[in-house]
Image: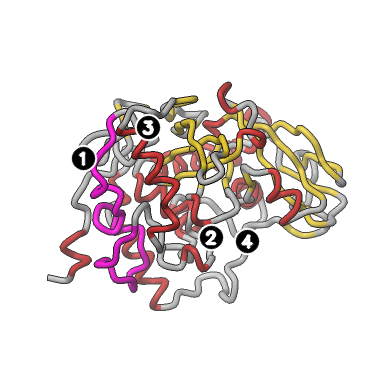
Amino acid sequence: MPFRTALKKEYSTSTVYGEKYLVPWLASAGLLAYTPEQPPKDYFFQYGWVLPQIFNPEVNLRKHYYFGALYKDQAKILFRFWERARRGHVSQRFCELGVVSQNELKAPIAVYDHLHEPRSRGGLLIIQHGSYQWVERESQPDIESGQVLLYRGVERAPVFRHLGFEPEGLSSFDLEVWHKYLTLQAQMLSDSVLSFNTIHDRTKRCETSHLQDGTWLSDDLATQAGLAIHSPGFARKLWAATHQSYSLERWVGARKFGPHYVIFKTPLFNIRITTCFAGEAETRVIDPRLLNLIDGVGCRVECAASRPHEFRRGGSDLKSPARKGKVAGDTTPRKARKIEALLTGAASSPW
């Protein structure tokens, strides 16, 4: 029996708790339902064994991928956190179950204190479905009250435009699009493997090359759900707005992608995080209505709600991004294998 087949889906990865709740851990029940208050053995940090579905089909799963990282050294900060958890030396700063309803979706998320050695920098560790982000307290002063600051660099663009709307003001057709979108997000958050794969499906960096990082899986799921994300209209605007990347660290927006950048505040339950070794403390939002502007540094910020054209940033379209090097519908054999592996078992979501 092939090694990958022998490992496949050995543990439950459903995050559904009760009728409408979601947990931030790898599972709501079973061996992967561990928490910092009930830490497991190191065995369960070896994602190649417990979450083999998150990896590129071409990688060798006999290699150890702790917390999904390519090298064990990349996960040192996480090993230190769980060592402290076993000694009872971690403090929870925020934890909220996800909630699914007809008109609202809240993502599950948990936040703990954690020192970043060797310089003993005080910070916070954010946990969501197998992804971890460590951030400095200075970048996130309001996190204990359930609010998070998001930073996005716009280089030298004079204007940053973001999508704003109210469901009550949508046409019946666009309201149906909104409900389909919320249902799809709930499906993606209802399983930790699907959640991990859809938040990393377009990272495309050397640090994530061993993951399912180039599948654009969420786009394929959106198309299957009946969302016309490649055609003009509300679905494309909504999809583009919720796939813009923000950072949890100010320096990423200000220095790496600056000098102009914007700062928004949003509830913690409105974000989905990539994992720490992917870089840039990257996150995306679920509901663009919940972005509250704090500041535009070097640029002004406009709401695109009433604009008839596709909303833009500094003259650059922010339509649903085209897949680099591919035309719509292009499927290479490698990508086909990835998508087939990712969609296996995803249809059993309760939503």
Camera-side residue of 310 and 226: 310
Q: Which residues are magenta?
A: 38-65
Residue type, label 1: Leu
Residue shown at the point (57%, 46%) measured from the top left: 283
x and y, in percent, of residue 204 in the image: 53, 65
The local crowd at label 1, few if under 14, some if 14 to 19, many if 20 or more residues have their Cα within 10 Å, is some
- Marks 1 and 3 close (CB-CB < 8 Å): no
- Marks 1 and 4 close (CB-CB < 8 Å): no
Residue 24 horizontal side relative to residue 305, left or right: left
Task: Nearest to the eye among marks 1 and 4: give it.
Answer: 1
Residue 88 position (above or below residue 210): above
Q: Quadrant of the N terminus?
A: bottom left
Nearer the N terminus, badge 2 or badge 1?
1
Residue type, label 2: Thr
- Marks 3 and 4 close (CB-CB < 8 Å): no
The local crowd at label 4, few if under 14, some if 14 to 19, many if 20 or more residues have their Cα within 10 Å, is some
Give the structural element (helix, strand or loop) at label 2.
loop
Q: Quadrant of the C terminus?
A: top left
Q: Is residue 170 visible?
A: no
The residue at which mark 1 appears reads as 31
Task: Nearest to the eye among marks 1 and 3: give it.
Answer: 1
Residue type, label 3: Leu
Task: Nearest to the eye among marks 2 and 1: give it.
Answer: 1
Estimate the spatial distance between the alpha carbons at disc 2 and disc 1, rounded to whole Å: 29 Å
Nearer the N terminus, badge 3 or badge 4?
3
Whether residue 48 appears in magenta in the rendering, the answer is: yes
The residue at which mark 4 appears reads as 321
The residue at which mark 2 appears reads as 203
Nearer the N terminus, badge 2 or badge 3?
3
Q: Majority secondary structure of the magenta segment?
A: loop
Camera-side residue of 32 and 133: 133
